[in-house]
Image (cartoon, rainbow, N blue to C red):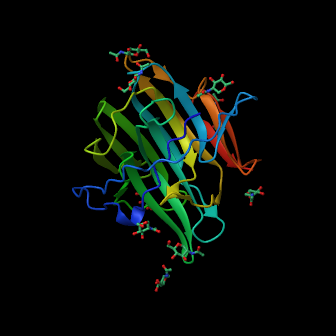
Amino acid sequence: MRFNSVFISSFLLASVALTARPRSLRLNLVERPANDSSDGIEYGDNWAGAVWHQANGTFESVTGTVTVPDVWGPTNSSATVAVGIDGDTCPNFAMVQVGVKATVTSNGTNYQAWHSWSPADWVLVDIAIFARNVIKLTLTISDATSGFAIIENVSTGQSVRQQLQAGRSGYPLCQQNAEWLLEDFFLNYTQVPLSNFSMVTFTDAKAVGNDSRIYTPQGAIISDIKQDGQVLTSVSVNDSSVTINHV
Ligand SMILES: *[C@@H]1O[C@H](CO)[C@@H](O)[C@H](O)[C@H]1NC(C)=O
Ligand SMILES: *[C@@H]1O[C@H](CO)[C@@H](O)[C@H](O)[C@H]1NC(C)=O
Ligand SMILES: *[C@@H]1O[C@H](CO)[C@@H](O)[C@H](O)[C@H]1NC(C)=O
Ligand SMILES: *[C@@H]1O[C@H](CO)[C@@H](O)[C@H](O)[C@H]1NC(C)=O
Ligand SMILES: *[C@@H]1O[C@H](CO)[C@@H](O)[C@H](O)[C@H]1NC(C)=O
Ligand SMILES: *[C@@H]1O[C@H](CO)[C@@H](O)[C@H](O)[C@H]1NC(C)=O
Ligand SMILES: *[C@@H]1O[C@H](CO)[C@@H](O)[C@H](O)[C@H]1NC(C)=O
Ligand SMILES: *[C@@H]1O[C@H](CO)[C@@H](O)[C@H](O)[C@H]1NC(C)=O
Ligand SMILES: *[C@@H]1O[C@H](CO)[C@@H](O)[C@H](O)[C@H]1NC(C)=O
């Protein structure tokens, strides 16, 4: 299974100002883990959740509503929730995502919304997010190199809409994969320790195909995080939800 590690770049350098251009780091990729799916689950070191594999040009949008998890663990450990398009089977490493990163600091947990168009740096989104906020994450693709992301506070109905552009450093999408994920990201080619996290459930999870077909998580491929031979997550899906637990 391909795991496109879009998070290697430094978020310290990422742009908070929406108009600023994110820094480009072209060599943002790490070796993909071996495909180890003997039990029908795919394992990788950085990605847990449900992912669809379809033909080129299939996915036009993906959405899910998620309660921002509590996280705990060593300082600097982190966990990220996101929805994405591509990143798994597209041969050129393209992937677009929108999500929320939770990092354990010496002062408590820091929550940060972001989006990214791999392999360009991620772009930080200026919206205050805290544990247990209910947010709706949506990506809509206009074509292989542009689209938009929406982060909606479900409690208030307020939302932030961000234009997405592959730009100079983001690769064109295949629109082959749609996914709902919990991720253990990379910073400067080093994987951040995965924090423990309260149960993550994406509800109202669906992706829309080019013929208006609705793809629910049911039937998508299940993926778990395995590091040093240890499986760290447990994923279940039904026709509207994806649930990811730390084990
Ligand atoms: C991984 O291996 C399984 C079983 O060998 C195979 O069915 C599946 O297509 C492979 N997946 C990828 C993404 O290569
Ligand atoms: C729409 O999706 C189908 C099935 O996934 C794919 O075969 C087809 O090429 C796509 N059409 C366009 C215009 O991209
Ligand atoms: C956490 O990360 C910061 C920034 O990279 C670093 O300065 C600090 O030493 C790290 N702390 C621990 C406990 O790893
Ligand atoms: C922790 O918070 C205190 C008080 O707000 C601040 O002075 C300090 O710089 C913070 N430390 C870190 C590592 O963020
Ligand atoms: C959502 O709105 C609630 C209620 O006003 C607020 O406490 C929370 O910080 C907001 N969260 C986000 C992500 O905007
Ligand atoms: C799918 O699209 C990508 C990007 O345009 C291209 O590199 C790849 O060869 C295509 N794959 C197939 C099977 O057509
Ligand atoms: C990442 O690496 C760059 C270049 O070596 C360095 O400037 C930056 O401080 C590093 N960021 C972190 C968070 O370690
Ligand atoms: C993570 O938290 C869960 C729930 O509290 C707990 O069952 C599990 O043992 C924890 N795992 C680790 C490695 O701390
Ligand atoms: C799907 O799972 C979610 C989360 O566990 C649950 O709330 C929902 O009721 C389930 N839906 C069905 C149709 O079973």
Q: Is residue 116 left or right of residue 77?
A: left
Query: Looking at the rendering, in which quadrant would you find the N terminus?
Result: top right
Q: Residue 205's spot in the image, x, y percent?
A: 51, 34
- Looking at the picture, does residue 84 appear above or below residue 230? above
Question: Of 2 and 136, which appears nearest the observer?
Answer: 2
Write the residue at 47% across / 53% down.
7
Q: Residue 199's spot in the image, x, y percent?
A: 65, 50
- State which image quarter holds ligand 3: bottom right
- Looking at the picture, does residue 209 appear above or below residue 185? above
Q: Residue 109's spot in the image, x, y percent?
A: 54, 68
Question: Of 129 and 211, which appears nearest the observer?
Answer: 211
Q: Residue 55's spot in the image, x, y percent?
A: 45, 18
Question: Of 150 and 174, which appears nearest the observer?
Answer: 174
Q: Is residue 85 left or right of residue 78?
A: left
Question: Of 67 and 230, which appears nearest the observer?
Answer: 230
- Looking at the picture, does residue 114 appear above or below residue 111? above
Write the residue at 66% across / 41% down.
224
Number of numbered discs on residues: 0
